[in-house]
Image: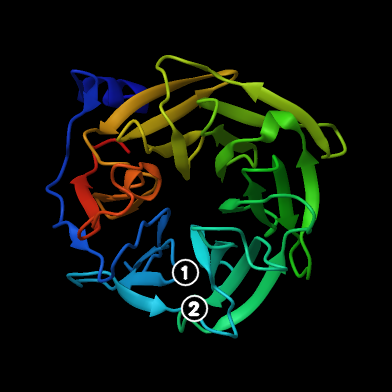
């Protein structure tokens, strides 16, 4: 049976049915964590970012996400968005940004930071060019080993060449303002979503590989705050939607894509990861940062929510 037919058979009331029981939800051992991103490695570790700069790790069989890499003078961590476990390079990449809650400190810039994936030891930092408001949001690794990062605020795409020591600007423009999730399809095509415009887009290139603009893919469903984006192989991705509170399967077909809900009813879910047949989504509780009615209230414990992944993924 074709995979598309399998997926269709699993759809029930707009949501794919589950194929295996999920593991327990995972509490994050920290206060006011506000996790923006989540990633996993083949050993079964989960890593999540936090608004105060700590990277948490949940080890296989662990019952909570514990502080693993904490801010210090050497690593310069302040506030984290995207994290990505890159086993090809043995690196945990992290998008670091000036802290929330006031103007940035003098000289503060967004950057991509590298940590040893096994030990958590600090390795390097690659700063975004100064002079513009910036927000490093998400990271992806290309087939050639280049590490890509986006800038939501200024609408830019950067890459760190294999063996390079500085970020290279690939594209910049108003059409990229709001870029969020970033991931490569199996054929090397780069796809992004836009959290402000609720778009899923292909990054087009000229024959020489340079930037040729964006193609807005036609979707069968409306997106609501698309955020974290992870490749599944082929032209398939799992996408988190924070305001929409859902995880969805995105399947690209040329200039269109189908959106199939995998998990709904989440609370401000900006990211997605999976281990085996279990999916995980961070609970962002972002309203406690920006809603005047909630800003000074205790958001309580933050959880990484678990759910069974459907057969066919």
Local crowd at mark 1 within 10 Å, few (<14), some, or many (≥20)?
many
Sequence-wise, the earlier of marks 1 and 2 is 1
- Picture coordinates of residue 115 (x, y %)? 55, 76
Res. 86 visible in picture: no
Give the quarter of the image for residue 256.
Answer: top right
Res. 174 visible in picture: yes
Seen at 17% across and 40% down, the residue is 19
Seen at 78% across and 58% down, the residue is 129
Name the residue tied to disc 1.
Answer: 53
- Determine whether label 1 and label 2 are within 8 Å by CB: yes
Say above or below: 157 vs 139.
above
Seen at 36% across and 46% down, the residue is 286
Give the quarter of the image for residue 107.
Answer: bottom right
Of 30 and 16, the residue lying toward us? 30
- Picture coordinates of residue 138 (x, y %)? 55, 51
Of 312 and 82, the residue lying toward us? 82
* 46 left or right of 310 in image: right
Name the residue tied to disc 2.
Answer: 71
Total count of labels: 2
Local crowd at mark 2 within 10 Å, few (<14), some, or many (≥20)?
some
Say above or below: 13 vs 268.
above
Q: CA distance from mark 1 to mark 2?
A: 6 Å
- Picture coordinates of residue 92 (x, y %)? 52, 69
Seen at 57% across and 67% down, the residue is 88
Kindly state the secondary structure of the residue where label 2 is placed: loop
């Amino acid at each position: 049976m074709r995979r598309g037919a399998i997926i269709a058979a699993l759809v029930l009331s707009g949501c794919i049915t589950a194929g295996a029981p999920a593991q327990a939800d995972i509490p994050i051992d920290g206060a006011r964590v506000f996790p923006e991103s989540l990633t996993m490695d083949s050993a079964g570790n989960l890593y999540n970012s936090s608004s105060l700069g700590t990277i948490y790790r949940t080890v296989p069989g662990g019952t909570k996400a514990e502080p693993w890499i904490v801010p210090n003078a050497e690593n310069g961590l302040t506030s984290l968005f995207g994290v990505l476990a890159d086993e090809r390079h043995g690196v945990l990449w992290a998008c670091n940004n000036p802290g929330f809650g006031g103007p940035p400190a003098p000289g503060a810039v967004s950057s991509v930071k590298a940590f040893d994936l096994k030990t958590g030891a600090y390795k390097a930092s690659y700063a975004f060019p100064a002079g513009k408001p910036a927000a490093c949001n998400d990271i992806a690794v290309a087939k050639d080993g280049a590490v890509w990062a986006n800038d939501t605020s200024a609408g830019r795409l950067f890459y760190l060449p294999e063996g390079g020591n500085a970020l290279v600007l690939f594209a910049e423009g108003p059409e990229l303002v709001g870029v969020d999730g970033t991931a490569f399809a199996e054929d090397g095509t780069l796809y992004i979503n836009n959290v402000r415009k609720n778009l899923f887009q292909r990054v087009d290139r000229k024959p020489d590989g340079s930037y040729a603009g964006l193609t807005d893919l036609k979707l069968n469903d409306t997106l609501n705050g698309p955020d974290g984006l992870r490749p599944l192989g082929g032209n398939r991705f799992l996408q988190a939607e924070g305001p929409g509170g859902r995880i969805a399967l995105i399947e690209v077909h040329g200039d269109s894509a189908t959106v199939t809900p995998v998990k709904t009813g989440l609370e401000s879910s900006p990211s997605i990861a999976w281990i085996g047949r279990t999916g995980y989504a961070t609970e962002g509780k972002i309203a406690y940062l920006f809603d005047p009615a909630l800003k000074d209230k205790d958001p309580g414990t933050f959880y990484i929510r678990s759910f069974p992944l459907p057969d066919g993924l």
